[in-house]
Image (cartoon, coloured by chain):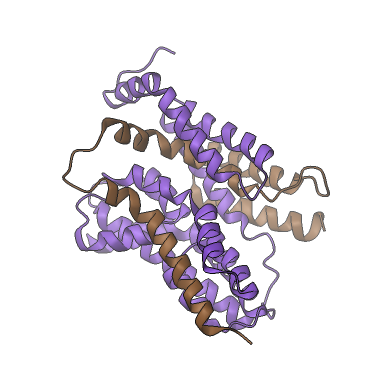
Amino acid sequence: MIDVKHSLILVAVMAAIMAFLRFSPFIAFPEGRKRPKVVTYLGSVLPYAVIGMLVVYCFKGVSVFSYPWGIPELLASLLVLGLHVWRRNTLISVFSGVAFYMVLVQLVFK
Amino acid sequence: MTKRTLKRAFKDSLPILAGYLALGMGFGVMLQSKGYSFWWAILMSCTMFAGSGQYAGVDFLASGASILTTAVMTFIINARHFFYGFSLLDKYKGAGILKPYMIFGLTDETYSIVCSAKLEDGINPKKYYFFLTALNHCYWITGCTLGAVLGEFLPFDSKGIDFAMTALFIVIMVEQWMSTKEHLPALLGVATTVVCLIIFGADMFIIPSMVLIATELLLFRKKLDKTSKADESGVGGND
């Protein structure tokens, strides 16, 4: 019922694409060779923009127009934000946020 | 020194441990529900090491998608990974024999920690990045395999535990925000992605976001380049 050969080929293709995406910047700009200043500049500002992008990426499946209107995500995110500004402890912020979010989606907004 | 480095990497990886076990198990459950044994979960988590990529991969496998469809869709879904290397060209420089594996295992989560970790003296940065990558990879393989073995008979209701990733990215964004006076790149990243998500929808917004963010950062280069130099030399900006 499973086409083993075709499935193996697909896994190999997906792994190759992943490796291509991850390796290409390092192959395009190898160690010891001068690289354009603009690449160094992008490398220095991208982390800030990319983390912003990843935060939004995490909310891509949230619908604000239907129940529960993104309320659990909003409340848990605010808790993480507040806790982290206050205590600056990553573990406390993350695990409190997760526990609170699990309570919200499992018990409150069923 | 190595032990201290490993300890620090383990401590920083704990939020990811929770998230990867949860997300990995979700993947494993999905995969076995399509008739694939846990060997496939091990194979995919070892060779791909990609959350959203593997979730989509289950659909490709189960539907017997063509090679071209699989290649193009995997590229689109994971294109954001293309950005990560640009910020790590210097950090990963000189990592030698460890470097290929560190690049191979560069996930969203590892990238975000590598970018923001402030390492004290006595910690070997290259080894720290390597340990972080390897630990995360172990968590991911464990999660994926457990999910495929246990299937629907999970011992507890894990719904919502994947919020660990969201929380981690929010924390890192707060840390970055507090570490610099220049908030334009972060604001551009959020605003551009929100606009693209609304316009292009949840399946197609990442590549337009990436292109726009890169373009905007290039347009603001004059302003931002100056600020980054001022930050480095310890001179505060006036604006």
B101 w.r.t. B89: above or below:
below
B205 w.r.t. B147: above or below:
above
- In percent of the image, x 26 and y 55: which residue is there? B126
Task: Judge left or right: residue B61 versus residue B132.
Answer: right
Task: Judge left or right: residue B95 versus residue A100.
Answer: left
In percent of width and height, residue A89 lies at 49, 46
Q: Which quadrant would residue B104 be assigned to in this image?
A: bottom left
Which residue ends up furthest to the top in the rendered image?
B238
Which residue ends up furthest to the bottom in the rendered image?
A1
In percent of width and height, residue B55 lies at 59, 65
Q: Which chain is brown?
A: A
- In percent of the image, x 77 and y 43: which residue is there? A64
- Chain B palette colour: purple
Quarter of the figure with the N terminus of chain B: bottom left
* Residue B18 visible within the image: no
Q: Which quadrant would residue B24 be assigned to in this image?
A: bottom right
- In percent of the image, x 38 and y 58: which residue is there? A20
- In percent of the image, x 28 and y 45: which residue is there? B89
In percent of width and height, residue A84 lies at 54, 41
Q: Which quadrant would residue A22 be assigned to in this image?
A: bottom left
B95 w.r.t. B115: above or below:
below
Quarter of the figure with the C terminus of chain B: top left
Question: B29 or A40: which is nearer to us?
Answer: A40
* Residue B153 visible within the image: yes
In percent of width and height, residue B149 lies at 59, 83
